[in-house]
Image (cartoon, grey):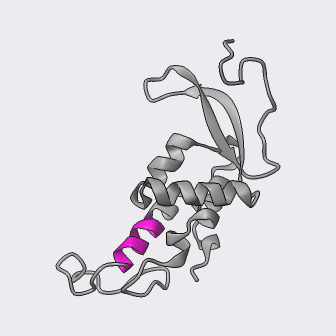
Amino acid sequence: MADLQALRTLDDVRDFIREGYRASGDPNSRLNRDRPRLAYGFEWGHLPPVVARPGPLIEHAVRLAGSDGLTLRQVRDLFDMLGKERLDRGMEFARGAGLTEETWEKRANRAGRLQGQVVLRAPGSLKRAGAPGDEPGEES
């Protein structure tokens, strides 16, 4: 199994996922001829288990984000290749196993307006606790 500790940035996580999906393809395809070797110790012919069941990989990405955490949108963007169902299963696993915690806070959305959003963080790394207006449906 690949060593997740070697992934030091969120870009590394994104590359890791892409390489995992490349591994599930045909090594003789036109797309892979120029790059016959796989990174991270992956083997050709199947989706690596750490990518197929991404709960621990999601936890690692959340830890890399530090105390700022990741919004659900950021997680979806980072793990875009997984597809909704696989990502949802990975998120459920991470939550159920206590690998991530969720908080609700106001953050800028893509348009730059403050909006209540779910933020994932590593257990014990909560940036702040329940400030007024941070609950769903509350206005500040």
Magenta segment includes 20: yes
Q: Where in the figure is residue 41, as x and y percent of width and height?
A: 49, 85
Give the residue drawn at x 42%, y 57%.
83
Q: Is residue 84 at all visible to an observer of this figure? A: yes
Q: Main secondary structure of the magenta part?
A: helix
Looking at the image, can residue 11 be seen? no
Which part of the image, by quadrant, shows the C terminus? Answer: top right
* Between 31 and 8, the one nearer to me in the picture: 31
Task: Find residue 38 and report its horizontal and vertical position in percent.
Answer: 39, 83
- In the displayed structure, 123 sits above or below 114; it is below
> Which stretch is magenta?
15-23
The residue sitting at 53% across, 49% down in the picture is: 75
115 over 5 or under it: above or below:
above
Q: Check the picture and name the quadrant holding the N terminus.
A: bottom right
Residue name at image x 45 percent, y 53 percent? 84
- In the rendered image, the vertical position of residue 95 relative to residue 16, given as above or below: above
- Report whether 70 appears left or right of 46: right
- Residue 135: which quarter of the image? top right
Horizontal and vertical percent position of residue 82: 44, 60
Residue projecting furthest to the top: 140
